[in-house]
Amino acid sequence: MKNIIQELKNAKNRDVLIIGDLMLDEYVFGSVSRISPEAPVPILKEERKEWSLGGAANVALNCKKIGCDVSLVGIVNETDRAGSILLSMLDAKNLKDAIIKSFYRPTTLKQRLMAQNHQLMRVDAEDSKTLSRSEKNDIFEKVAKILKPNSIIIISDYAKGIIDEELITFVNLQAKKNNSIVLVDPKGPNFSKYKNLNFIKPNLKEFKEMVNFFKLPAENSILENGKKICDLLSIDGLFVTLGDKGISFISKNDHIFSPALGKKEVFDLTGAGDTVISFLALGLLNHLPIDKCLEVANLAAAVAISHLKTYAVSLEELFDKNIQFQEKFIFDWRNLKTELDWHKIEGKKIVFTNGCFDLLHSGHVALLSEAKKCGDILVVAMNSDESIKRIKGDDRPIQNLSDRAKVMSALGFVDFVTVFDEETPANLISFLKPDVLAKGGDYAAETVVGYDFITSYGGEVKIINHDFTHDKGFSTTQLAKRVKGEIEDSVK
């Protein structure tokens, strides 16, 4: 997977044109402590509001986050509150250059009411009527002007009036003139309008709607009906997202399935499809094999749904996430903190311990096993190679960081592994704010690095008393000396 991500980071083709329905996602966060006396419904006490780019705007943000050169075509009413906020956010992301401004068509707003990080209700304000003739002409003019040769066009259709058969026909004609690919995120009920495009990315619900629209047998497999839809629409293929199952690519002559990655709790599905289509677009644009496109899109989706609200995933983040799903090692402290914060939301207690762990031995295993019992999630912070060299001398470490991290990650009771470069983990402890700091040996708790900080917010330091000592050989230094002595004896 790392090779795939690196290939995308080095990609030369990055021109993406996105056309579709622009939206503003508004989140009203608050708390619920009582039921309304007027009706059996909860009362949300508002605490704060946050906004995110939605619809085609979120697709554009996702594409930009992975290094694409993005042009975004859509319509926003600059005179209403939602439109004003949306334009300001687009401007901040340098995504405003091709936006058409309307004075009568209200900006689509999706307001989500949130309590204890769970969605209570969504309120939609929108106008889905077809565009006026002048608005259509403005879009045609923008597309013809900014579309670059050998690019990819993403049509983000949310059925809010922007995308219709006439626009799709025009876009397809421009794509063929410019040797460009067209990838569509579809919306019914009229799926026949997508005829002769390259690729369509329905989710499972939309796929079933397509099956019903084309009057295909519902009892048929996804593969059978998918191939038939490809034939009826004369398209190159379907990317069917299957939720927690993964993604299937179906064409008239091929079928590739990629299972979902990273089994973990889903916090918010909002925008996951936008993340998938963005990564598929970059892969297709750079001729990445379909199976590799699916793998990287699955990984990106797993990252996106672990966050509240819409979330744009970077290629750099995927390096850490790929390792995490397989080996638990997260190099970037910020990404580790994000993971730990979600575990805290679930009410889990975070335990932190640290060390060089140069040659993992039974003493280490006993320490880590006991540390795990102090809470729910065990984080092991390892000194970097440079840090160990400064502390232990030029002949250490015996194993490099990569090897030490792999061995540590193989322990079932270790949940996360990270690294620090200083002589002590004080800065890392301050950044992560664990609930428990576990330390092995005969220390007084007050002398442990991080004691003052962790106790300042109610955390605790646990001293784990071992029934082993360095005298018994349970140290890396002693083991190294024993091994060295045996080697010298054998040479003699």
Image (tube, rainbow, N blue to C red):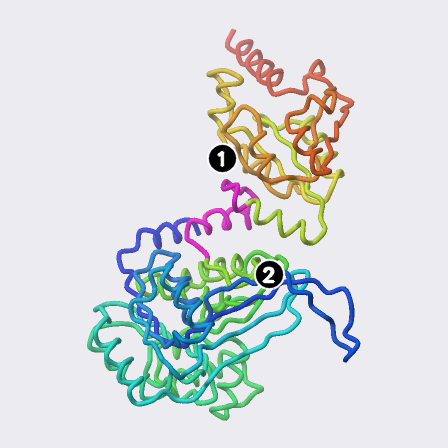
**What amino acid is labelled 1 in the image?**
Ser
Point 46% across, 72% down: residue: 81
Count neighbours of disc 1 (C-alpha within 10 A) and say few if under 14, some if 14 to 19, many if 20 or more: few
Residue hosting label 2 = 48
Whichever of labels 2 and 1 marks the residue nearer the N terminus, that label is 2
Dot 1: what SS?
helix
Q: Which residues are magenta?
A: 313-335
* Residue 166 falls within the magenta-colored stretch: no
For residue 177, above or below residue 470: below
Residue hosting label 1 = 402
Residue 270 visible (yes or no):
yes
Q: Residue furthest bottom?
A: 215
For residue 102, above or below residue 366: below
Point 44% across, 77% down: residue: 107
For residue 125, above or below residue 430: below
Residue 353 placed where, x, y %?
Answer: 65, 32
**What amino acid is labelled 2 in the image?**
Arg
Horizontal relation, residue 206 to residue 232: left or right: right
